[in-house]
Image (spheres, helix red, strand yellow):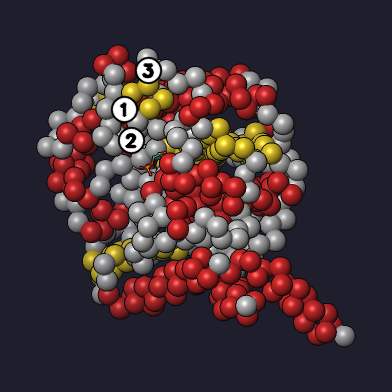
Amino acid sequence: DSNELVPALNYLNEKKTEPNSEMTGVAEGKNVILLSLESTQTFVVDNEVNGEELTPYFNDLKEEGAYFSNFYHQVKQGRTSDSEFILDNSMYGLNRGAAFFTHSSNEYEATPEILGENGYTTSNMHANDKTFWNRNVMYDSLGYDEFYGKQDYDVTEEKSYGWGYLDEYFFEESLDKMEEMEQPFYNKMITLTNHHPFTLPEDKKYIDEGDTSSGTLNRFFQTIRYQDEALKQFVEEFKQSDLYDDTVLVIYGDHFGISENHQEAMGEYLDKDINDYEQFQLQRVPLLMIGEGIEPQESDTVGGQIDLRPTLMNMLGVEDDNPIQFGHDLFSEDRREMMITRDGDFANEDYVGVKDACYDRETGEEVDSEACEPLFAEAEEELQMSDSIVYGDLLRYLDETELIEEEESDQDEE
Ligand code: GP9
């Protein structure tokens, strides 16, 4: 019953931090485009292979907006779908399986629902089968109005490769669709080309393969470079369009592309030994926000995908009355810098805690594990709180609980 929500409400109340008031409403009434870059990790940014930049366009673009260099993905088995779950709910995905499959009939009060109540049109675009990750079902539960899937795109064999529709064509058609959309809109675009096994048609290989001992990593460099070229084409066209002045563009990486099976090759490429600490730091993914009112800046605040919803809602100046959110505004001065992974590992301002060991976050030196103990405990408590909501489908009691709280505070006042 509604009492089951109380522990999580109390916990979140205690952890609550105020959003940055200077950012409140900077993007009021604007469209939001979330651009999910497949398998894109931060280590590719400002990096090169054989003397060629991997993401030349993104490297420049990030100077035009708010770029977050210590932003982590938080997904587990649900991969891209986990990132979507975390983003829209500001709750953690599950430790096993994908919430998109196992908890698609839950009650949610996700970003699209709240924005829908505030006059927004909400949609997803992804040129894959709609049933992949059970998206067709889960998007309804999350409150999306529209889902543009494979059949809504002009997918032909010539324009496809590997997993399907090449990003450049996906972007082109998606922009056309957005230009026709009722505004303001909240729309997520999910790319596909930079996906394992990272293959490309010959004429889309803009740089040579890498020369590490992993073919996967070697090809990844090429697909990342391809994606960057597609991104360039998209952003440049977007800047020419009428949408540009009225839109916040949020570009982020969904999860890692190179798994720990390729640690040795990563070590060869980065020229260091990839231990648990380095492997953890490789889970950073880029986050960049561009739009009027967003000052160019680079932030090194420690955060994760769970923080995007409160950050965005504050920028849009939308009253988000769902109190069950585990994230903290990324622009807030007094935010809790604590990024928790689904494995119960974490990074905060000072430490990285991974597999029960404790490291100095900046130097990577292993330190006395005592320093991390309370933080591991906090991570575990937080994951349990989030799980209690998802497994118990507790958001269905939210309205009731709020009514009780209102009555109680009325009584207090009397
Ligand atoms: C498939 C795309 C990729 O539709 O989201 O899925 P992933 O394997 O990255 O989770």
Q: CA distance from mark 1 to mark 2?
A: 8 Å
**Does the image show residue 13?**
yes
For the point 31% across and 53% down, the residue is: 281
Query: Is disc 1's CB within 8 Å of ligand 1?
Result: no
- Which comes before the other along the chain, label 3 or label 2? 3
- Which comes before the other along the chain, label 3 or label 1? 3
Q: Residue 148 versus residue 48: which sits nearer the camera? A: 148
Q: Residue 166 versus residue 335: which sits nearer the camera? A: 166
Q: Quadrant of the C terminus?
A: bottom right
Q: Is residue 163 left or right of residue 314?
A: left
- Give residue 131's position: percent from left, percent from top: 46, 41
Name the kind of residue labelled 3 in the image: Glu
Mark 1 lies on residue:
162
Task: Describe the element under mark 1 as helix, strand or loop.
Answer: loop
Name the kind of residue labelled 2 in the image: His
Name the kind of residue labelled 1 in the image: Gly
Q: CA distance from mark 3 to mark 2?
A: 18 Å
For the point 53% across and 47% down, the residue is: 137
Q: Sort mark 2 into few (<14), some (14-19) or many (20+) by Cα contacts within 10 Å.
A: some
For the point 36% across and 40% down, the residue is: 39
Q: Which mark is residue 195?
A: 2
Ligand 1 image position (quadrant): top left
- Which comes before the other along the chain, label 1 or label 2? 1
User: Which of the 4 image quarters holds residue 48?
Assistant: top left
Q: Is residue 263 left or right of residue 234?
A: left
Query: Is disc 2's CB within 8 Å of ligand 1?
Result: yes
Mark 3 lies on residue:
157
Task: Describe the element under mark 3 as helix, strand or loop.
Answer: loop
**Does the image show residue 57?**
no
Q: CA distance from mark 3 to mark 1?
A: 10 Å
